[in-house]
Image: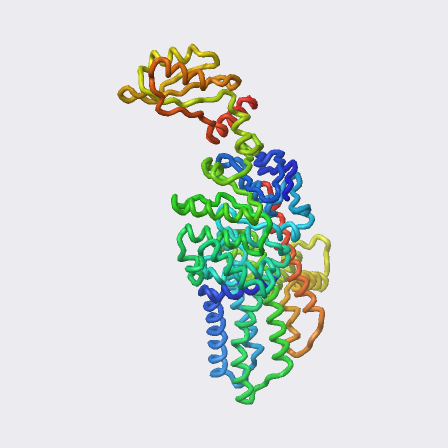
Amino acid sequence: MSAIYKRELASYFRSPIGWVAIAIFALMGGFFFAIYMQNSSSVNISDELNFLRYVFFVVIPLITMRLFSEEKKNGTEVLLYTAPVPLYKVVLGKYFAALSLLLIMVSSTLIHVVLVVIMGGLVDTGTLGSYIGFVFLAAVFISIGVLCSAVTENQIIAAVISFVVIFFSTILSMIASTVQSAFVSIVTTLNFLKLSTSSINKAGEAVANGINWLDPSVRTDTFTQGIFSISPLLFCLSLVILFLFLTYRILEKRRWSQS
Amino acid sequence: MIEISNLVKYYGDKKAVDHISFTVNKGEILGFLGPNGAGKSTTMNILTGYLSATSGKVLVNGADILEQPEIAKKSIGYLPEQPPLYLDMTVVEYLKFICDLKGVPKDERIRQMAEIMRLVKISDVSGRLIHNLSKGYRQRVGIAQALIGNPEVLVLDEPTVGLDPKQIIEIRNLIKTLSKRHTVILSSHILPEVQAVCDRVVIINKGKIAAIDTQDGLSHKLSSNSKLALTFEGPFREAAGKIHALPGVIDVSLIRESDSIQQIEITTDPKTDTRKSIFFAMASSSWPILEFRSLDPTLEDIFLSVTSSEEKKRR
């Protein structure tokens, strides 16, 4: 597993991809930080990280798109599948390489933390919580990217699919409130069962909650206030395991496929 | 060493591999011969564990490739049709990665890599990016990759495809050298290659085994009538008539004629040795024999007769 991890991480820096991803991330982070510093009396790193979540759907497809698709295209996957290494270790090696690159990217924002500390700003458990939530969210999205890369041998398609999926999961809370209001208005107009307004509103809320239940970023929201709990982390971890397991099964299935 | 039994692989409705069984003995070079699309690569992909068969079994050193893949794969080095190279790495970086991947112990690595690079003659390009290497060198790096971890079996899928004649000869010599320490399975659709390198040949066509034998055995089996080539000085028509009259001679045909020198091919019944009587017949007419030799069927003949007889059977 370490062989694949090392090669994969090194290959990010052999090609422009690793550098470009880090550059985008550092640029967006720095940009936000500078503007924020100018326009606001207080600086909060959590806000910067919340903003940087919107960079995910550009950066994560960029760093995950080639993981499996390129191997397939270049015929190097034969090497990995005929080596005495179990397939799940191949998947994990690649996943951790992408995750490590993301950690390197995130560490570029530590300069801002240092600046905040120097200038007497607030760095507390909320900041730490933001980082933890941020990394776990990224871990989930990377596993989605890995899965997309295993589905197709075309890097562009892999990138587009993971872009769409990550984009929609990022705006899931917006989708939830839209669906909620749509649900409430539809049920109110078509009120065959003569439900009371309050119960319709309650049902609408339940629908929104249901959608939000799926959203890893909503779950880690309390982290930014320094309130930690284990269940959001377990939720993210379960998603990671789920997507990586699906990746593993897809790759395994390809060996058996008869087409 | 390797036992393959009743291997079947479907691609959709198409049977790419149809009940293939054979064994490979330790230390031999087995040639795997067939036209393009016969199922050679599919079989090799299955026996190296890259693909899974629809049914059937592959045992490598007694370990099932599906049930104990790690053990089985450890004793196989595989060079697929397209060498699996990372073009963005240098040769040394690449081989180090392969060592990592195959779990070669750290203290053996440098020695093993140096030895292999010397053997396949890539030491002089060790620091270069694989991207910048010629096809011949890339093929060698591919072979080096298969050799790392010192596997007992080497599986080489069309190792000389796309190389120039000089490189082909070098690669063949390399394979012969390798066979001293490894069991080699080699696929090819080029007949002289198999003839030049292999001890035993498996011929497959349309996913089925058409023949398995040693080269000599195959030649014998298929020489339903033996042929002689004769070059002499004298008139063709008279000589042909005289030879044709001899017992055991089936046919006489002219191959080439220049001035008074004739080159003819004589087809004889393999049960009777006609060589002496032909000699005396020529001598008694004072037609000097310039060349006289028996023609063994080439693998090409074998291949054609085997594959076409398969087709006839099917019809």
Determine whether B67 is above or below B122 in the image.
above
* Pick the front one: B121 or A12: B121
- At x 64%, y 66%, the residue is A216
Determine whether B122 is above or below B300 in the image.
below
* Pick the front one: A145 or A74: A74
State left or right for residue B255 relative to residue A20: left
Determine whether B231 is above or below B245 in the image.
below
Percent coordinates x, y for residue B296 in the rendering:
47, 27
Asked if residue B180 shows in the view, the reply is yes
Percent coordinates x, y for residue A250 in the rendering:
61, 51
In this view, the residue farthest toward the left is B259
The image quadrant where one finds the N terminus of chain B is top right
Say how the picture is coloured.
rainbow
Percent coordinates x, y for residue B144 in the rendering:
50, 54
* Pick the front one: B241 or B70: B241
Q: How many marks?
A: 0
The image quadrant where one finds the C terminus of chain B is top right
Percent coordinates x, y for residue B102 in the rendering:
59, 57
Asked if residue A250 shows in the view, the reply is no
